[in-house]
Image (cartoon, rainbow, N blue to C red):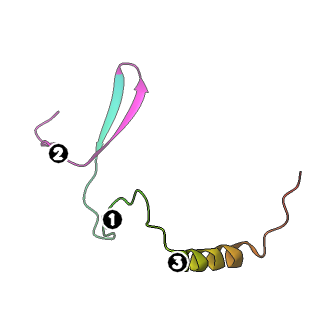
Amino acid sequence: MPPGCPPHSAVTIQELDNSTWIVKRQLPSKEFKVVVLPVVESLPDDPEWEKVEEAFARHASKNLPEPEE
């Protein structure tokens, strides 16, 4: 890599074929913020919260058409 691209630089890599890559440097944007969230593998069982989730799902799907077979 060229000296202008130090280790751990933010880049995008596009593979054109088996022997050709395009590496583009990503310059920091002042228009966006990055938010890092932890990965949640599973949630604990909570019957009260499941009622809330069910209400969310009913509300979100009430205007959907019936599926066609």
Tell me: residue 52, above or below residue 18: below
Q: Residues within 10 Å of mark 3 (few under 14, many from 20)?
A: few
Q: Residues within 10 Å of mark 1 (few under 14, many from 20)?
A: few
Residue most toward the top?
19
Q: Residues within 10 Å of mark 2 (few under 14, many from 20)?
A: few
Sequence order check, earlier mark of 1 and 3 = 1
How many discs appear? Answer: 3
CA distance separating discs 2 and 3: 41 Å
| 6 relative position to 19: left or right | left
The mark found on residue 37 in the picture is: 1
Residue most toward the right?
69
- According to the picture, the residue beneath numbered tag 2 turns out to be 8
Q: Position of residue 48 (x, y in %)?
A: 54, 80
CA distance separating discs 1 and 3: 21 Å
* Residue 57 is inside the magenta segment: no
Please tell me which residue is depicted at 73% across the width and 72% down the height of the picture: 61
Amino acid beneath label 2? His
Sequence order check, earlier mark of 2 and 3 = 2
- Asked where in the image residue 44 lies, by quadrant, the reply is bottom left
- According to the picture, the residue beneath numbered tag 3 turns out to be 49
Tell me: residue 64, above or below residue 19: below
